[in-house]
Image: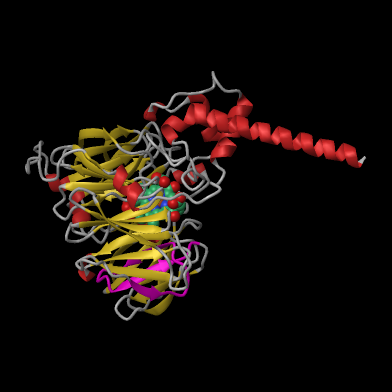
C-alpha cells in the first residue's frame, strides 16, 4: 500500500512538473517577447498580480484567446488549447518567487527623450483657448483626447501607455500634461505641440504622480518596488529614488502622493507603515520629514489652506485630520463608508468650509465641517459613488453611483445643492449605461459626464439648467481634466 502511495505521489509530482514546464514554455513562446521574460513588461504591460488587479480572470482568458485590438495584441486561440490558456492565466496571476528589482539602473535605461527639452515652439498649434482645454482619458483603447472646452470639439487624439490611472497632472502654465500608468510609465505630453516629449518607467506598479508647484519636479509613488521616484520635470530624467522604509525599518507601499503648493512640498502617505512623509521640493537634497499617524492611510486630502491633511484607511471607520505644521492629529472624523478622499471637494456652507467625499461602500456623501471636524450631513445618493466634482461658479456638486454593484444605480448621477445639502436632481445620461466622473469648464457653466462604456460618450450638460447640450462618442472615457481648473486648484476638482 505504502509503495502504491509512493508511486502515486511520484506520478502526481511528475505531472505537475510537466504542467509547469509546459506553461513556462508557452509563456516564453507566446508572451515573453512583449511582456518580458521576467513578466515585468516590455511593449506590453507587466503580468503580475499587482498589475492585473483590474483585469478579471475571465477577461484575461478572453484577451489571451482573442487578443486585444486596442493594443494590437494577437489572439492565441488557434495556437493554444483552452486548458493551456487557463494555465497561462493562473501563471500570470502567481506572485514572483523573488521580488522584482526596479531601481536607478532600470529607471535610467527606460528613459526615452522623444524630443529634446525646450526645442518645440512656445505657441499652440491650434486656436482654442489653451486654458479651457480638457484632457480626456479613454481607457477603452488606451488613448487620450485633447478637447476644445468652448466648442466641445476634439482637437487631437493620441495613444497613451496601457492603463493610465489617477488624474494627469499639469505644469503650472498648463502647457504640459504628465500621465502615469499602472505599470509605472510616466509620460510628458506637450499640449501646445500635441507631442509626447519624454517617457520613463519609474516603477513596476505605480500609484500616482505629483508635479511640484514650481513645475520643476515630478514625484511618482510606487506599490512595487516600495519607493518614491523624483524626476526632473523638463525631460523626466531621474533625480533620485527614495526607498519607502518606515522608522521601524519596515518597507512600505506608497498609497498616494500629492503636491502642497502653499507649503512648497510634496506629501506622501505610506500604506504599510503608519507615517506620512513631507518632502520640500525647493531643497536640493529633498529631505524627508516623517509624521507619525494613528492608522495606515490609503488615501488623503488637504483642506484649502493645505495646513491639514485628512486621511483614512479604506477598511477603517474613522478618518483623521493631521495638522501638518505640528505633525499632530487634531481630530478623528466619522467616515464610515470607505471614503474616496482623492475625489473629495470643498466649498463654503453657512460660513464654514466643508469637505465632501463619496463613499465606495455606502450610497452617501459625507459632508464634514473643516473647523469642527464634525459631520454636517450624510447625503443619501442613488448608489455608492467614486468621483465627486463641483466648481466655484455652480450651486451644485455632482457625484456618481459608479461603485454600486446594481446597474440601476450605476447609470445615475446625483446632483446635490451645495446651499441646502439636499439632492436637487438625479440625471441618467444614458439609461442602463454606467455614468461617472464629472468635470466643469473653466467658467463652471458646463459639466461633462463620462458614460464609462466601450461605446461610451461624454455627455455635456448646462450646469445651471441641468439640460444636456451635446454628446461626443468616446471609448470608455474615464477622467477628464480641465487645464484651468487644475492649475488654479479649483475647490471643486481633485488636486
Ligand atoms: Fe483610482 C484617482 C486610488 C481604483 C480611476 N485613485 C485615484 C487616486 C487614488 C486612487 C489614490 C488619486 C490619485 C491622483 O489622481 O493623483 N483607485 C484607487 C484605489 O485605491 C482603487 C480603489 C483600487 C486600485 O486598484 O487602485 C482605485 N480608480 C480605480 C478604478 O477601478 C478606476 C475606476 C478605473 C481605473 O482606471 O483603474 C479608477 N482613480 C481613477 C481615476 C482617478 C483616480 C479616473 C482620477 C480622478 C480625478 O478626477 O482626479
Q: How is the image coloured?
A: secondary structure
Residues 80 and 411: in front is 80
- Left or right, 235 with respect to 428, comes to left
Total numbered circles: 0
- Which quarter of the figure has residue 411? top left
- Residues 311 and 384: in front is 311
The outermost residue toward the right is: 1
Residue at position x 27%, y 70% in the image: 306
Q: In this picture, which residue range is highlighted in magenta?
A: 289-314
Residue nearest the viewer, comparing 57 with 370 = 57
- The residue that appears at 63% across and 28% down in the rendered structure is 83
Can I make out residue 389 in this image?
no
Q: Give the farthest residue toward the top.
A: 78
Q: Position of residue 303 (x, y in %)?
A: 30, 69
Task: Let me know if residue 294 is in the magenta part.
Answer: yes
Residue 164, quarter of the rendered image: top left
**In which quadrant is the C terminus drawn?**
bottom left
Query: Where does the N terminus fall, quadrant-wise?
Result: top right
Q: Is residue 428 magenta?
A: no
Q: Position of residue 132 (x, y in %)?
A: 16, 46
Q: Write the residue at 19% across / 49% down.
A: 483
In the displayed structure, does residue 328 sit left or right of residue 484? right
Note whether residue 220 is visible.
yes
Relative to residue 292, is residue 60 depicted above or below? above
Q: Position of residue 402 (x, y in %)?
A: 44, 48
User: Looking at the picture, how far across and down is residue 84, in whole percent?
Assistant: 61, 28
- Placement of 381 over or under 305, stated as above or below: above
Amino acid at each position: 500500500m505504502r509503495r502504491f502511495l509512493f508511486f502515486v505521489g511520484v506520478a502526481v509530482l511528475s505531472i505537475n512538473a510537466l504542467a509547469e514546464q509546459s506553461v513556462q514554455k508557452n509563456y516564453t513562446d507566446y508572451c515573453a517577447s512583449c511582456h518580458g521574460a521576467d513578466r515585468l513588461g516590455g511593449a506590453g504591460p507587466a503580468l503580475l498580480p499587482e498589475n492585473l488587479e483590474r483585469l478579471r480572470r475571465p477577461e484575461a482568458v478572453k484577451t489571451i484567446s482573442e487578443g486585444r485590438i486596442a493594443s494590437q495584441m494577437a489572439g492565441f486561440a488557434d495556437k493554444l488549447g483552452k486548458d493551456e490558456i487557463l494555465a497561462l492565466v493562473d501563471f500570470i496571476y502567481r506572485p514572483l518567487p523573488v521580488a522584482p528589482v526596479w531601481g536607478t539602473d532600470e529607471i535610467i535605461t527606460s528613459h526615452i527623450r522623444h524630443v529634446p527639452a525646450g526645442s518645440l515652439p512656445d505657441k499652440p498649434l491650434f486656436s482654442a483657448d489653451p486654458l479651457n482645454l480638457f484632457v480626456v482619458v479613454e481607457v477603452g483603447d488606451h488613448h487620450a483626447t485633447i478637447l476644445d472646452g468652448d466648442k466641445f470639439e476634439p482637437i487631437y487624439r493620441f495613444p497613451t501607455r496601457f492603463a493610465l490611472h489617477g488624474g494627469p497632472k499639469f505644469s503650472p502654465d498648463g502647457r504640459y500634461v504628465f500621465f502615469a500608468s499602472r505599470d509605472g510609465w510616466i509620460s510628458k505630453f506637450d499640449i501646445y505641440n500635441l507631442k509626447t516629449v519624454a517617457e520613463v518607467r519609474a516603477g513596476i506598479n505605480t500609484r500616482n504622480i505629483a508635479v511640484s508647484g514650481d513645475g520643476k519636479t515630478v514625484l511618482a509613488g510606487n506599490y512595487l518596488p516600495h519607493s518614491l521616484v523624483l524626476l526632473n520635470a523638463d525631460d523626466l530624467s531621474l533625480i533620485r529614488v527614495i526607498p519607502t522604509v518606515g522608522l521601524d525599518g519596515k518597507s512600505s507601499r506608497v498609497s498616494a502622493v500629492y503636491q502642497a503648493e502653499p507649503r512648497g512640498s510634496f506629501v506622501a502617505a505610506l500604506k504599510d507603515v503608519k507615517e506620512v512623509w513631507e518632502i520640500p521640493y525647493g531643497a536640493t537634497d529633498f529631505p524627508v520629514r516623517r509624521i507619525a499617524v494613528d492608522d495606515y492611510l490609503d488615501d488623503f486630502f488637504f483642506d484649502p489652506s493645505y495646513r491639514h491633511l485628512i486621511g483614512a484607511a479604506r477598511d477603517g471607520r474613522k478618518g483623521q485630520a493631521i495638522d501638518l505644521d505640528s505633525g499632530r492629529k487634531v481630530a478623528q472624523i466619522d467616515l464610515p463608508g470607505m471614503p474616496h478622499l482623492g475625489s473629495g471637494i470643498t466649498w463654503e456652507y453657512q460660513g464654514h468650509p466643508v469637505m465632501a467625499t463619496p463613499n465606495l461602500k455606502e450610497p452617501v456623501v459625507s459632508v464634514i465641517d473643516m473647523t469642527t471636524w464634525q459631520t454636517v450631513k450624510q447625503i443619501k445618493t442613488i448608489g455608492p459613488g467614486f468621483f465627486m466634482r463641483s466648481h466655484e461658479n455652480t450651486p451644485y456638486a455632482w457625484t456618481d453611483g459608479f461603485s454600486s454593484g446594481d446597474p440601476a444605480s450605476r447609470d445615475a448621477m446625483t446632483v446635490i445643492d451645495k446651499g441646502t445639502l439636499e439632492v436637487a436632481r438625479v440625471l441618467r445620461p444614458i439609461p442602463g449605461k454606467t455614468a461617472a466622473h464629472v468635470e466643469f469648464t473653466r467658467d463652471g457653466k458646463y459639466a461633462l459626464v463620462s458614460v464609462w462604456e466601450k461605446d461610451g460618450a461624454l455627455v455635456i450638460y448646462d450646469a445651471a439648467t441641468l439640460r444636456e447640450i451635446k454628446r461626443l462618442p468616446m471609448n470608455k472615457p474615464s477622467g477628464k481634466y480641465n487645464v484651468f481648473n487644475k492649475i488654479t486648484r479649483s475647490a471643486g476638482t481633485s488636486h
